[in-house]
Amino acid sequence: MSGTIYVRAANDGTFVAEVADLPGCVARAGTRDEAITKVRGAFRDYLFLLRQRDVSTEHYDTLDPETFAVKDVKDFFPEDAERLEEHEMRDFLHQMEASRSALLALVRGLSADEIERKPTESTWSVRQALEHIMSVEVQYLGRLERWPDKEFATLQAVHRMAFQRFTVMEPDDWTDQQIMGQRWTTRRVMRRILAHEYEHLNHIKEIIAGLGGDRQPS
């Protein structure tokens, strides 16, 4: 383990600090020094989160975040270029489940009003934050694809996820509700999904034509 904190400047003017040896342990602040201080504390908090959900942390417990070296990076961490081992994938999956468990424990039991309401005009609601997590998770998965070599696996996986969500819905789920001031129904969501894909089907046709191709869907 390197015992390193990496700091980078974000596009919004803030600073992001991450612990190299503990994926997921991150802090953001308005200054570089504040981000470093926050991530040292986040190291202990993140280990506590994992232990609460029966994820082993014994190989981290002897580390002292106050002694971690600090290095500035633009974006890519040197450790991220190393070959991924099977045990690291298992650790990641355990951490992924623990992280989602903590998130669900936090939001379960909130009322509809608490999920929709923004604390202030300039902050997000809980719903906006959760929708952001969902959309970015899909976006990052897309970065793994070697298209077209892998038959568009993530694209299809997301499609199956959406398809499965509709297949398990009961009539009582076909709701009519107000979300962030807008009226939404299951029919409207279905229509938007199909319309969005069809728009981009034609968009991609235009891109291919611009590349000098004239390929029609098979």
Image: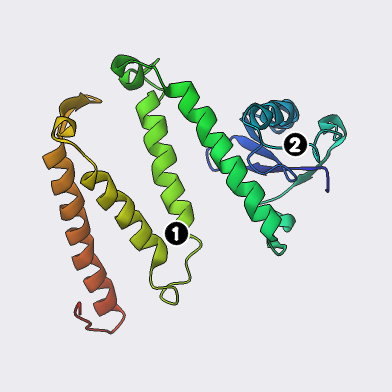
Mark 1 sits on what residue?
142
Q: Amino acid at mark 2?
A: Thr
Residue 210 position in % (x across, y down): 27, 77
Decide: is 155 above or below 47: below
Q: Amino acid at mark 1?
A: Gly
* SS label for mark 2: loop
Q: Is residue 117 visible?
A: yes
Residue 10 position in % (x across, y down): 58, 42
> Mark 2 and mark 1 in contact (Cβ < 8 Å)?
no
Residue 208 position in % (x across, y down): 28, 77
User: Label 2: few (<14), some or many (≥20) within 10 Å?
Assistant: some
User: Label 1: few (<14), some or many (≥20) within 10 Å?
Assistant: some
Q: Residue at x 18, y 28 (%)?
A: 182
Distance between mark 1 and mark 2 Cα atoms: 30 Å
Residue 167 position in % (x across, y down): 22, 47
Decide: is 121 above or below 157: above
Mark 2 sits on what residue?
57
* SS label for mark 1: helix
Q: Residue at x 22, y 73 (%)?
A: 205
Q: Is residue 101 left or right of residue 179?
A: right
Q: Is residue 118 left or right of residue 58?
A: left
